[in-house]
Amino acid sequence: MPDAVRPTRAELREAARAQSRAERRGAAKAATRSALLGVALPSLAALGVAGAAAVTVQGGAERSTVAGAAPDAAPAGEQVPADGRTPDPAGGTDTERAARGEARTELSAQEPAAAPVEAPPAPARPTVSLPVELHGLSATYGEAGTHWTARHTGIDFPVQGGTPVMAVTDGTVRTQWNSAYGYMAIVKAPDGTETWYCHLRTYKVRKGPVKAGDVIAFSGSSGNSTGPHLHFEVRPDGGAPIDPLPWLLAQGLDPR
């Protein structure tokens, strides 16, 4: 069996150097892998990547493959703000949206308040009124007849018994009985004019203040009367009677 050939010192030194170079290369590769993982993995975590990072070493070359996609990645053509805030459809960040909301609130506050709706004015109260609603006269002032000891001192309204009788003017009412006039009411106006309402059935207001148009009594046929009707007189200053028709016409009222 031939003797083994021993390597020379030069060959031994070359082998030692090759082994040293191989060890240095291995240490450098390990350091490179650690550096790549230290940079890539934190960056992927900051970007919110849900997938895992796979690192493959082939032929001494380092290659990193990212598996999976970011769940909140923006659609194609849409940019996500660098601070991570989600834009709204109108555009802008949360701060810009809040600013727009404040602007809308200010504009709303500047809108004029709706004008108050005014209630329709109340109908004016009449200053004078006819004594009954029915128009038409059955007897006029100054007529002669068998029912009167002298000429007729007022006008007659041929109303049915129980018809409401109203005060012609504002004033104070009083009531009394008279054998000729029957149950009667007298309203004295502020200027002293008295209006008489005669042959009544009943009273609604026996005494006290009244307004024009207030119901004060109900018509009848009491006293010297042949049937239900209202006998009406006007007496300035409570004196002698005058023709009520011209007086009513002067007040803008026509009983005919």
Image: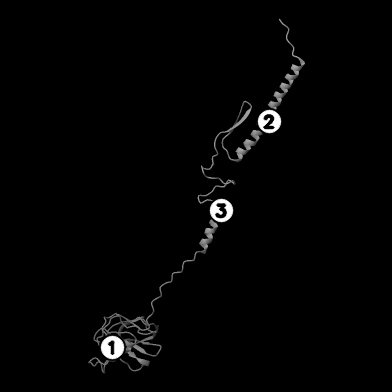
Can residue 178 be seen by looking at this rendering? no
Can residue 30 be seen by looking at this rendering? yes
Position of the N terminus, as image quadrant, is: top right
Q: Are marks 2 and 1 in contact (CB under 8 Å)?
A: no
Circle 2: residue type: Ala
Residue 81 x/y as whole percent = 57, 46
Residue 98 x/y as whole percent = 55, 54
Q: Is residue 209 above or below residue 42?
A: below
Q: Nearer the viewer, residue 124 or 50?
A: 50
Circle 3: residue type: Glu
Tag of residue 31: 2
| Crowd class of label 3 (few under 14; some 14 to 19; many from 20; radius 10 Å) | few
Tag of residue 155: 1
Position of the C terminus, as image quadrant, is: bottom left
Please tell me which residue is depicted at 28% across the width and 88% down the height of the picture: 155
- Quarter of the image where one finds residue 118: bottom left
Q: Are marks 2 and 3 in contact (CB under 8 Å)?
A: no
Please tell me which residue is depicted at 76% across the width and 17% down the height of the picture: 10
